[in-house]
Image (spheres, rainbow, N blue to C red):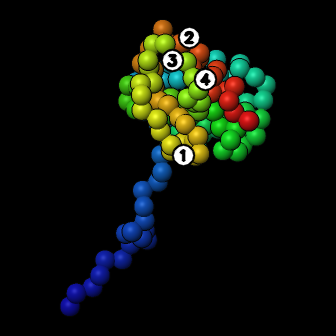
């Protein structure tokens, strides 16, 4: 006679979601340091910044937690920090063309967004120029 296996755990239980802290712990040391340095610089943009991990991303808001006040999203891969920012096609300036021509509409609903990658500390100054534009657009 066949008897089913009995376990205390549900076999259909989904794996736990990765947190921002999990992601940060798994990246290489340079990416972790670049991320920490960039966040320190971002938080100096203003006293009204609200920031928090949201699942596997890190989100920054200007003044309040609302979609129109979101100005920055950070996403990690093993050796890369991906940055998403709010943009206005009429005023956005990216002379180094880090963001390319592609416009996204995912992290910032009903707004234009651009993405760029940071691989090393020497890129942070220019990244901050792009992020400052996004911060200025947030309401």
Of mark 4 and mark 1, the one earlier in the sequence is 1
Q: Which label lies toward us, 4 or 3?
A: 4
Residue of label 1: 55
| Residue 21 in picture, x, y percent from top left | 53, 37
Question: Quick check: marks 3 and 2 in contact, CB under 8 Å?
Answer: no
Of mark 3 and mark 1, the one earlier in the sequence is 1
Residue 94 is marked as 3
Residue of label 4: 91
Question: Quick check: marks 4 and 1 in contact, CB under 8 Å?
Answer: no
Residue at the spot 27% in from the left edge and 85% down from the top edge: 3
Residue 96 is marked as none
| Residue 28 in picture, x, y percent from top left | 40, 24
129 vs 136: above or below = above
Image quarter of residue 45 = top right
- Dot 3, how many residues are within 10 Å of its Cα: few (below 14), some (14-19), or many (20+)? some
Image quarter of residue 54 = top right
Residue 125 is marked as 2
Farthest residue in the bottom direction? 1
- C-alpha gap between disc 1 and disc 2: 27 Å
Residue at the spot 38% in from the left edge and 30% down from the top edge: 78
Give the structural element (helix, strand or loop) at label 4.
loop
Give the structural element (helix, strand or loop) at label 2.
helix
Q: Is residue 64 left or right of residue 27?
A: right
- C-alpha gap between disc 3 and disc 1: 29 Å
Q: Which label lies toward us, 3 or 1?
A: 3
- C-alpha gap between disc 4 and disc 3: 10 Å
| Residue 101 in picture, x, y percent from top left | 42, 28
Q: Which label lies toward us, 4 or 2?
A: 4
Q: Which label lies toward us, 1 or 2?
A: 2
């Amino acid at each position: 006679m066949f008897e089913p296996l009995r376990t205390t755990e549900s076999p259909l239980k989904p794996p736990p979601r990765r947190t921002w802290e999990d992601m940060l712990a798994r990246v290489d040391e340079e990416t972790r340091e670049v991320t920490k340095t960039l966040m320190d610089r971002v938080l100096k943009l203003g006293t009204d910044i609200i920031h928090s991990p949201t699942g596997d991303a890190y989100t920054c808001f200007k003044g309040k937690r609302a979609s129109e006040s979101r100005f920055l999203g950070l996403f990690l891969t093993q050796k890369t920090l991906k940055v998403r920012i709010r943009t206005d096609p009429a005023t956005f300036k990216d002379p180094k063309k880090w963001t390319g021509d592609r416009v996204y509409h995912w992290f910032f609903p009903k707004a234009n967004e651009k993405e760029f990658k940071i691989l090393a500390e020497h890129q942070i100054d220019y990244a901050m120029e792009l992020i400052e534009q996004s911060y200025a657009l947030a309401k």
